Structures are given as C-alpha cells and as structure tokens.
Amino acid sequence: MNADDAGLPVIRVRGLGKRFGPVVAVDALDLDVRPREVYGFLGPNGSGKSTTLRMLCGLLRPSGGEIEVLGLPLPQAAEGLKRRLGYMTQSFSLYRDLSVAENLGFLAAVHGLPRRRARRRIQALLERYWLTDLRDQFAGTLSGGQKQRLALAGAVLHEPELLLLDEPTSAVDPQSRREFWESLFELADAGTTILVSTHYMDEAERCTRLAILDRGRLVADDTPRRLMAALPGLPLLVECDRPRQAQQVLEGQPGVIALAQIGAALRLLVADARYETALRARLHAAGIEARLVPGTANLEDVFVAATQRPRQAAGETP
C-alpha cells in the first residue's frame, strides 16, 4: 500500500537538517505534503529550497532528521524511489546533442519502459507538450520555453506519483510560464503530487499550499489565501506628488517593515495601525502632504513579513 492509498502524506519530514561545514542550509524542517497537492516552496536565494528538494529525492544525504517519501524512508530507500518520482532541475539537464525524440527515448530506456509502451508514451508527450514538429531537432537548439517543455516531458515520462520541480520557470517568458503551470494542474488532476520551488509571487499564489523558507527554516505554511488573511502587518498606500522623496523620508522609520514605489504611489508594510499617525506626521514635517490609505494584502507582503525582521527594536513604540 502506498502513501496515497493509505491517506498518508506523500512527503513527511521531521526535524530535517543539512549542514555544509559550519553553514546550516536547512534547519529543523518539518513538512507534510498531501496527495495531489501543488505544494509551493517560496524563499530568498540561499533559503534552503534546492537543498531540501535534493534531499527529498535522495540525491543528498541529510545531516539529521527523518524523511519519508511515498511511504519509503530516505536515504535508505532512495534506489526504490527512483521510478516513482520525477525531478526537474532549474538548469536544462538533458543532452543538447541529442534530438528531442532521442532524449525521450534515452530516458525511457533508463526507466526500463518496455519498447512498445515507450513509443506510445513518447508520442503522447510530444503531442501534449507541442514538441511533435521538433522531434528531430537537437535539444541544444531549442528556445527556453521549448527546453522547459521537453524537460517536463522527460520528468513525467515514466508517470511518476510525485514530481519535484526546482525553479523550473526561471528562464522562460510569461506566456511559457502560464502554459507550464496549466500543465502542472493537469498532472495534479490526474493524480500526481507536485512540489515546486519558485521565486515568482504570481506562481506561488497559484499553489494549493505554500511553504516559505528563510535561512533554512520554515517560517510559514498554509494556503496562499489564509497566509494573506493572517498577514502580521498592515499594508498602506501613500498617495502624494513626490513618492520617491516620501520613500527616502520613511526609510528606516519605526514600524516600517518594507516600502516600495508602485507607479505613482508608495506602498508600505507597517507593523500595525499604531504607526500610521507618526508616519503621516513625519511626512508632513518633511514638507510632503500625503494620504495614507489601507491597502490590500498580497503574497509579497506575506513574504516580506515572514523573511524580513521588523526595523524597529522589540518592544519599541511609535
């Protein structure tokens, strides 16, 4: 009985850690990924996303903790897991001097697919990922979006139960990203569980559940909607004639967690509403007349609040 049949998490991690010498890359990570989820990993560079994914597919031995994937303990059962999961790296990892069809044929042989099944599967994937007209083209000559589609076809060729994707859309255009995510949801609907790391907020918002990592630690884990509803801070829009000067005035002020110019307005994330009057007064003292109006929480606010320490000292009041 596999993890899905038993109603258990497809991925279960407890106290997972990884050190590289004195550097702690992953620190006491607890994680549960349920069947058929599109589970997102969001975090700044160096937060431990790629390291965690490599441990989850058995490519990297953890320094401590427990991993169970599809009911199998890792790293002990890594060999038995290979044909049950697919893994797609950030960089294109297929053979550039082989054609599209030859790459898929090679992967079919690696996974031990019978010849007849391999032919049917390859043909279906060429059609599904718009690669039929490119089947004889060398992989190294494909565009970024075409390489991405080929890499996804290779990762799902053997129909894995679990798909691990490490920032798969980092080098493609917005339209290709949109098409790629439609393919992910199609796979999830067919029963595949997906764990995908990303640094795009719009992609993170599409996940059924989202983990935010920072300095190797899990700092948030819920649906994107619930994370935004529980935002530990207040978004404000500063409407004025001089948003750039307003940003310079408010930079580093008590209560300000983050600020950024959005068009002709300035967007603030403050610790709570108590700071609003003091910030308005600070702008007035600098000769800037402004309106501060409540904004709508977005996932970027959640990310900033979870990964950036407030500028004010603990216990400081406005």
Image: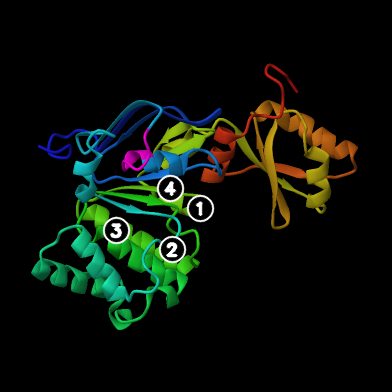
Residue 123, image x, y percentages: 19, 74
Mark 4–mark 2 Cα distance, whole angstroms, equals: 13 Å
Asked whether residue 138 appears in the rendered view, the answer is: yes
Q: Amino acid at mark 1?
A: Tyr
Most extreme residue toward the top, as rendered?
A: 315
Q: Nearer the viewer, mark 4 or mark 2?
A: 4
How packed is label 1: few (under 14 Cα within 10 Å), some, or many (20 or more)? some
Which of the marked residues, 4 or 2, is nearer the chain's N terminus? Answer: 2
**Magenta residue check for 60:** yes
Colour scheme of this structure image? Answer: rainbow
Q: Quadrant of the C terminus?
A: top right
Residue annotated with mark 3: 155
Label 3 to label 1: alpha-carbon separation: 22 Å
Judge from the rendering whether residue 84 lies leftward or rightward of residue 258; answer left or right.
left
Q: Kindly indicate whether the residue at mark 2 contacts the one at mark 1 (C-beta within 8 angstroms).
A: yes
Hey, what amino acid is under mark 3?
Ala
- State the extent of the magenta-drawn residues as a range: 55-61
| Comes first in the chain, label 3 or label 1 | 3
The residue beneath circle 1 is: 200
Disc 4 residue crowd, few under 14, some 14–19, many 20+, Cα 10 Å: many
Quadrant housing residue 60: top left
Q: Amino acid at mark 2?
A: Arg
Q: At numbered mark 1, what does the secondary structure look like: helix, strand or loop?
A: loop
* Distance between mark 4 and mark 1 Cα atoms: 9 Å
Observer-nearest of 254 and 286: 254
What residue type is disc 4 on?
Answer: Ser
Q: Residues within 10 Å of mark 3 (few under 14, many from 20)?
A: many
